[in-house]
């Protein structure tokens, strides 16, 4: 499975929000600048995240966006589902009725195992986990360049 730009950029935008959580509302233009995402595209990406209850949006001159719930409660699977839709690699894994061979197809077993592994990883990680990884990598980079 190849994740779309929509999922990759959307997750980067959420990570940016998580890194700036506690600073109040964040204007989309600053996320777009920091994450090198065009503002119109970012505005498009934020909509399903707001509709899905991950992001709160406030309009107006002092408006912006913020995480609707703590980063530790946002699982990556939920983010990908909102931005990509179902995570099934092939339709027969989620809906065996779409293929008459589903009950005897050994290749379907491979697709099913791959999907289980992918979902397991996405379900086991939260946005907070990414924040911690980001901070660890930044610290390591600072130590490398400051020696």
Image: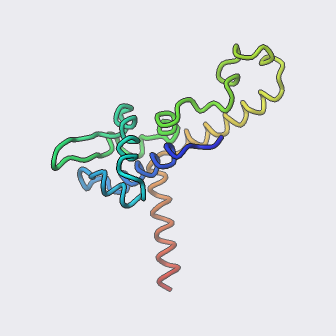
Establish if 142 lies above or below 92.
below
Residue at 42% across / 40% down in the picture? Answer: 73
Protein image colouring: rainbow
Quarter of image, res 34? bottom left
Quarter of the figure with the N terminus: top right
Instruction: Return the x and y of residue 14 as percentages of the image width and height.
Output: 40, 48
Q: Is residue 90 left or right of residue 87?
A: right
Instruction: Return the x and y of residue 139 as percentages of the image width and height.
Output: 47, 71
How many marks the image carries: the answer is: 0
Establish if 35 lies above or below 66.
below
Residue at 67% across / 33% down in the picture? Answer: 89
Instruction: Return the x and y of residue 119 as percentages of the image width and height.
Output: 61, 36
Instruction: Return the x and y of residue 35 as percentages of the image width and height.
Output: 42, 58
Residue at 46% across / 47% down in the picture? Answer: 11
Pick the residue in front: 32 or 72. 32
Pick the residue in front: 114 or 37. 37
Q: Residue furthest left?
A: 61
Pick the residue in front: 76 or 4. 4
Q: Is residue 86 left or right of residue 109?
A: left
Q: Is residue 139 left or right of residue 51?
A: right
């Amino acid at each position: 499975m190849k994740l779309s730009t929509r999922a990759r950029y959307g997750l980067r935008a959420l990570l940016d929000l998580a890194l700036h959580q506690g600073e109040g509302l964040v204007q989309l233009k600053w996320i777009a600048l920091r994450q090198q995402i065009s503002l119109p595209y970012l505005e498009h990406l934020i909509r399903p995240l707001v509709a899905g209850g991950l992001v709160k949006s406030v309009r107006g001159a002092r408006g912006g966006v913020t995480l609707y719930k703590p980063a530790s409660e946002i699982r990556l699977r939920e983010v990908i589902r909102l931005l990509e839709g179902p995570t099934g690699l092939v339709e027969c894994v989620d809906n065996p009725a779409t293929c008459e061979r589903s009950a005897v197809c050994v290749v379907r077993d491979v697709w099913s195992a791959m999907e289980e592994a992918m979902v397991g990883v996405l379900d086991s990680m939260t946005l907070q986990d990414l924040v911690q990884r980001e901070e660890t990598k930044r610290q390591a980079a600072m130590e490398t360049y400051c020696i």
